[in-house]
């Protein structure tokens, strides 16, 4: 695991934290089995979620990753109790999110993908309204201060920037002191500083014992925050684990500017056929160190210079892109065309 | 951001799982308060909701003082416009707009129940309708018209009328695509409201059907509750005002039940995809 990339902001931590999925449901804040979510009927029917299993351990941060249309939001909406599952079983805090709605909601904080507030109310009026609906809320001022909105309290929601509106949304999500927090793309549209602040909140929630599920397009965000990543594609979870675990077993890559001569046989290495005739030669290898050493030895012996040499282990990004292309996944049915709008 | 509230000082500990649950009344009042604020934010909506329904009273200034024919027409029109504007149309556009803004979906992620969310949207308009009816009653007295013949019937008329037209607003909202479309989708309900004031225009054999509309029920109740008359203008005893009011009250209750049933079956909480 020495070549495993570690998250930039919490070195090594993710791997240590990683806990294998437990079969004991009491350890889970969320348990999903065989979830299918179908829109429409008959010929127009479209399956956004196609038999999804998911376990979220209490006190962990789980990131749900996937391209647009992978089914992330469709899955979250069932967990949130906003939509019913077409098939399958969902337990949230040991309860049914639709039937036990009142009990589940009291302990859950939800951030939807799109904010939903009336433009004609001010920030503080909106926060007060939300406050009135909560069982054990933190004070309005505290909630607004947490997301640096105290100075914007009397501004109409209509006049807020996209990032400010998102922060107001998040302030409402956290106002009820939830033990389970479901965040659907919380940092989309935020400036880098606000984004870091959201990261700190998520880490703070985790330290305080809350469970967080976050969907995101940002791989660095998932790597930095999550104990466990769940990569979705075409309505299923196709890879799970820490960033390191997910990248492990995927080939490393060596690239350099094309040489005007043939390469020798390199142990473990293989030229990517798609790079033939391209300006850059791409090698894939299961053992980066051995292949790279052989390549460099050969180059020194022959007196060849390898321009713009680049060697990297498989990263979360490369695995994610491979999945998004429908190319690589272990034990996954062949990816079909990407569904849209789910 | 961190300069204002250092995260270290924030307590993000979840509330205890057995924390007492907030009461439905607190949620309802909190949500209704926000909806009332929204109503006051829009001058146009506010004047339509509060002033327009009182306009028929001005006819009384022109006619003979104490002329109950003019009085019944005025009060009947006030009830119709009060049910149509603050209750029906205001609520219809509120539901559709807030659904488009994803406010309804957001609210449903919280602790408020569906019924509380809906009721909180209806309440400001219903309160406005009650106020309008009260103001109109006082204005009638001041303009030489009699005091309400049967206050119980009058109050029941306002409350059941509000319930019926609020229910119809939710049902209409369920199949209204957006706020602009509401100008057209509101027509069926506007028709069954206005038809009550035009009852006399219809041939006699159609009148029993007209009597089944909520508009005609409100008209009959205005006559019985405020003026002690039946729809033909005959004087009623106090006991007779109850029996005469029973049918239109039942009509309003039936429309309310129908609207609630339809709403439960067809309510949409987020915009069509």
Image (cartoon, rainbow, N blue to C red):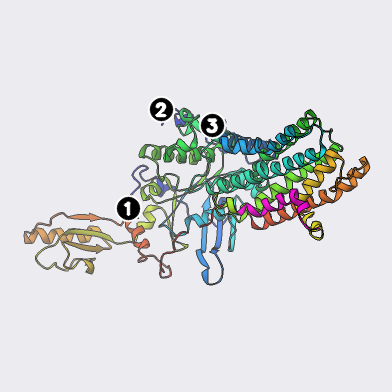
Q: Quadrant of the N terminus of chain A?
A: bottom left
* Count of marks overlaid on the render: 3
Mark 3–mark 2 CB contact (< 8 Å): no
Magenta stretch, overall SS: helix
Crowd class of label 3 (few under 14; some 14 to 19; many from 20; radius 10 Å): many
Q: Which residue is mark 3?
A: A124
Nearer to us of marks 1 and 3 is 3
Q: Which residue is mark 2?
A: B3
Residue B215 to residue B127: above or below: below
Counting from the top left corner in percent of width and height, residue B63 is at: 76, 35
Mark before the other along the chain sequence, 1 or 3: 1
Name the residue nearer the viewer: A235 or B132.
B132
Q: Residue at x 51, y 33 (%)?
A: A123
Could you tell me how far apart the alpha carbons at marks 3 and 2 are, in whole angstroms?
A: 21 Å
Q: Are marks 1 and 3 on the same chain?
A: yes
Q: Which residue is mark 1?
A: A4
């Amino acid at each position: 695991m020495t070549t495993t990339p570690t998250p930039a902001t919490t070195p090594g931590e993710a791997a240590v934290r990683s806990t294998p999925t437990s079969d004991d449901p009491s350890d889970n804040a969320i348990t999903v089995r065989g979830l299918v979510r179908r829109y429409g009927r008959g010929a127009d029917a479209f399956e956004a979620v196609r038999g999804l299993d998911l376990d979220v351990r209490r006190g962990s941060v789980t990131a749900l990753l996937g391209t647009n249309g992978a089914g992330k939001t469709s899955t979250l909406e069932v967990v949130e109790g906003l939509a019913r599952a077409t098939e399958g079983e969902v337990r949230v805090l040991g309860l049914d999110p639709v039937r036990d709605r009142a009990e589940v909601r009291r302990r859950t904080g939800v951030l939807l993908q799109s904010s939903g507030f009336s433009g004609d109310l001010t920030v503080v009026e909106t926060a007060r309204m939300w406050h009135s609906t909560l069982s054990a809320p933190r004070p309005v001022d505290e909630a607004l201060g947490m997301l640096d909105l105290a100075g914007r309290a009397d501004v109409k929601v209509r006049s807020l920037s996209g990032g400010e509106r998102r922060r107001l949304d998040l302030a409402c999500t956290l106002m009820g002191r939830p033990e389970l927090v479901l965040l659907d793309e919380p940092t989309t549209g935020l400036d880098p500083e606000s984004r870091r602040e959201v990261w700190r909140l998520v880490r703070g929630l985790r330290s305080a014992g809350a469970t967080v599920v976050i969907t995101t397009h940002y791989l660095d965000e998932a790597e930095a925050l999550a104990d466990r990543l769940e990569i979705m594609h075409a309505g299923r979870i196709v890879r799970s684990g820490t960033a390191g675990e997910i990248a492990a077993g995927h080939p490393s890559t060596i690239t350099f500017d094309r040489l005007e001569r043939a390469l020798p046989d390199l142990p473990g290495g293989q030229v990517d056929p798609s790079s033939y005739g391209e300006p850059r030669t791409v090698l894939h290898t299961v053992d980066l160190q051995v292949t790279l050493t052989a390549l460099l030895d050969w180059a020194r012996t022959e007196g060849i210079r390898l321009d713009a040499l680049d060697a990297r282990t498989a990263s979360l990004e490369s695995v994610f892109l491979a999945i998004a292309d429908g190319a690589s996944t272990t034990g996954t049915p062949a990816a079909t065309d990407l569904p849209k709008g789910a | 951001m961190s300069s204002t509230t250092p995260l270290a000082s924030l307590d993000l500990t979840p509330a205890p799982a057995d924390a007492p649950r907030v009461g439905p009344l607190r949620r309802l009042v909190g949500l209704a308060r926000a909806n009332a604020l929204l109503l006051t934010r829009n001058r146009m909506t506010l004047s339509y909701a509060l002033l327009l329904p009182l306009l028929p009273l001005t006819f009384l200034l022109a006619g003979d003082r104490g002329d109950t024919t003019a009085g019944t027409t005025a009060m009947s029109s006030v009830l119709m416009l009060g049910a149509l504007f603050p209750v029906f149309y205001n609520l219809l556009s509120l539901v559709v707009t807030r659904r488009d803004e994803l406010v309804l979906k957001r609210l449903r992620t919280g602790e408020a129940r569906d019924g509380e969310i809906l009721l909180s949207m209806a309440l400001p308009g219903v309160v406005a309708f009650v106020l309008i009816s009260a103001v109109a009653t006082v204005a009638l007295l001041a303009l030489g018209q009699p005091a309400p013949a049967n206050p119980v019937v009058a109050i029941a008329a306002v409350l059941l009328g509000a319930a019926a037209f609020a229910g119809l607003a939710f049902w209409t909202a369920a199949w209204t695509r957006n706020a602009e479309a509401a100008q057209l989708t509101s027509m069926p309900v506007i028709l069954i409201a206005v038809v009550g004031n035009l009852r006399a225009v219809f041939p006699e054999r159609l009148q029993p059907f007209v009597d089944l509309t909520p508009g005609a029920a409100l008209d009959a109740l205005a006559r019985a509750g405020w003026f002690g008359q039946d729809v033909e203008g005959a004087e009623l005893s106090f006991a007779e005002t109850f029996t005469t009011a029973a049918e239109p009250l039942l009509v309003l209750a039936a429309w309310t039940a129908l609207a609630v049933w339809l709403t439960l079956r067809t309510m949409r909480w987020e915009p069509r995809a």
